[in-house]
Image: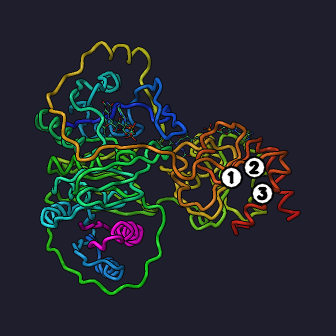
Amino acid sequence: MKAIVIYKWARATASARVRESGEVDWGAAKMTAGDDDPAALDVAKAIAGADGDVVGLTIGDGEAAWALARGVATAFTAPQVGPLADESATAGALAQAVRQLGEVDAVVIGDDPAHPGVAPALAAHLGWPVVLAVGSAALSGDGRVVITRKAGAEVETISLVTPVVLGAVAAGEEARPPGMMETIKARKKPIGELSVAAPAEAVTSTQTRRPARSGAKLLGGEPAEAAAALVTELRGDGLL
Amino acid sequence: MSIWVLATAADQLSPLLAAAREATEPTGQAVEAVVVGTAELATAASGMGVGRVHWIETAPDIPAEAYVGAVADLARRAGADVWLSGAAPAPRALLGAAAAACGAGLVGGGVALRLDGPTVTVERNALDGAVVETLTGPAPLAVVWDLTEAQPVDAAATAPVETVAAEPSKSGLRRDSVEPAATAAGLLTAERVIGIGRGVKARADLALIEDLAADLGAEMACSMPVADDLHWLGPERYIGRSGQRIAPGLYLALGISGEPQHMEGVRGAKVVVAVNKDPAAVIFRSATYGIVGDLYEFVPALREALRQD
Ligand SMILES: Cc1cc2nc3c(=O)[nH]c(=O)nc-3n(C[C@@H](O)[C@H](O)[C@H](O)COP(=O)(O)OP(=O)(O)OC[C@H]3O[C@@H](n4cnc5c(N)ncnc54)[C@H](O)[C@@H]3O)c2cc1C
Ligand SMILES: Cc1cc2nc3c(=O)[nH]c(=O)nc-3n(C[C@H](O)[C@H](O)[C@H](O)COP(=O)(O)OP(=O)(O)OC[C@H]3O[C@@H](n4cnc5c(N)ncnc54)[C@H](O)[C@@H]3O)c2cc1C
């Protein structure tokens, strides 16, 4: 089987500083892959199987090394596609890129809660079915993709035939990130470039502001004072 | 202008409809619901003050996601200006289909919506809640809404329910089995919960916190590493995106840094109290009350204050 893993290459959200004015100051934010992208790669590998093929795909100035250092043979980017606020536009560009990569059985993408629309819109642009919040997947004997996912207080097993778009979620940190040597070696290999026109966006970001309630009410003083103040507050809130 | 909301379960309906109603109130535009699920769900939607319900009936063992084609057809015909859904996997899959079908822009994290003539303005939580971002564009626009809590719904006249004939997708998508995920009895419904993080230094120190939990009548919970790496509490007791989501009145976080993956699990809590010795801990950004200090000093002080209260 052939699977594509799509990874997001963007500034780490944790490095954003919000000014008093509400403007976002990124400083020298480092670029990283999404938290869910390692899980997406695991799912792509599981579907492709031992002698299958996994291809990496990103957009903008995404680097190949992230995928190549993790055992992916080739990686591509669509350099004209920048960060977009419109997730259907991002997905439309990704769909064009996927179509340039030949016959594919599965496209797996990190189901990032910060970009909840990309995976489902990608499936819609490709005209393929989609399963989101995928924890793990495997290929069954009869060629169906069997998916396990947590849904509220339940664990579901879902299956379907290919082609399919899967949005994968990670349960935690990446278990075995590649070492320095693998990363250095991976950086020497080039990324393939796909020609996808920068899509038109249907929305524009006009401003950012701090949320109305931002920051805890701090209860200071010695532990005994802070504790007494907390008890008073919680009483006032009707919680004791 | 009209707003169409997409839902696959009853708990998604009231927050979406409250948002739609607030946005349409100034001018009284139409709100319609597309429900993909059981007859009960369609009936519930029809009593919630919408103009019309479009019902796509799901077959047992067929997930709602199998009906993306029918929703896309509906979206092509509907001429809706705004599409809203929650972030759960099924409605989000349907929203993606609706957006692509009608050429709508698509954004996530929506918390406020305004319709000005042909222009739609959305406010959304961005950067893990550090900012509220304003986005604007021409209709149609699709928004994954940030459903925090159910909203009370006023009794309303019953809306007509139109059945939409629909075939599930040819992909053979089906639900093979459903099993209950491990959950701790009492934790999901507890009014008070104490969560412990890696700020607790030794397993033996749990006794101190369990005593506080007994005083408060609270359930014990923890961050992921306390369950997964340290195994001090069972995996069914860690809170967060990958763990349990709870909505107690009080969540008391002791020695937890407050990473977004953890905090996602307590978004429904009324009050979050954070005790952390690092004044720069991110948990102080979203907690209701903060105590900058050592939990080993604060916990005994709190027990004493509760005794005197
Ligand atoms: C599959 C996939 C692949 C991606 N690959 C790349 C990639 O290769 N390179 C890349 O930069 N992004 C990439 N992105 C992310 C991009 O589309 C994001 O929307 C963007 O990086 C912002 O994400 P955020 O979560 O950091 O901030 P958001 O909450 O989305 O944005 C906050 C605000 O900052 C603005 N903003 C964010 N990043 C930038 C930027 N780099 N330049 C100018 N304004 C910005 C946003 O428009 C917005 O106004 C990818 C996303 C996906 C889903
Ligand atoms: C994809 C993904 C999913 C994840 N899902 C989850 C999830 O569902 N749930 C979850 O919890 N995490 C999850 N995580 C991990 C999460 O990002 C954090 O790493 C984790 O929550 C941190 O746990 P912690 O707060 O206990 O530990 P730390 O981050 O180490 O924080 C310990 C805190 O204790 C404070 N402290 C130390 N000593 C004291 C003292 N004596 N008194 C008071 N304070 C003290 C420190 O200042 C520090 O802030 C996930 C991560 C990823 C990448």
Q: Which residue is mark 3?
A: B212
Q: Nearer the viewer, residue A225 or A100?
A: A225
Label 3 neighbourhood size at 10 Å, few (<14), some (14-19), many (20+)?
A: many
Give x and y (percent) for residue B54.
22, 74
Q: Give the residue at x 68% y 50%.
A: A217
Residues at marks 1 and 2, CA–CA distance in whole angstroms? 7 Å
Question: Is tag 3's residue or tag 1's residue first in the polypeptide sequence?
Answer: 3
Give x and y (percent) for residue B73.
13, 63
Question: Disc 1, disc 2: CB below 8 Å?
Answer: yes
Residues at marks 3 and 1, CA–CA distance in whole angstroms? 18 Å
Question: Which amino acid is tagged 1?
Answer: Tyr
Give x and y (percent) for residue B185.
59, 65
> Relative to B9, does residue A222 appear above or below in the rendering?
above
Magenta residues? B1-30
SS class, disc 2: loop
Question: Disc 3, disc 2: CB below 8 Å?
Answer: no
Q: Nearer the viewer, residue A180 or A217?
A: A217
Instruction: Quadrant for the N terminus of chain A, please.
Output: top left
Magenta span contains residue A112: no
> Relative to B276, does residue B7 appear above or below in the rendering?
below
Question: Which amino acid is tagged 3?
Answer: Leu
Query: What is the number of the mark on residue B289?
Result: 1
Magenta span contains residue B28: yes
B119 to the left or right of B13:
left
B222 to the left or right of B129:
right
Q: Which residue is mark 2?
A: A219
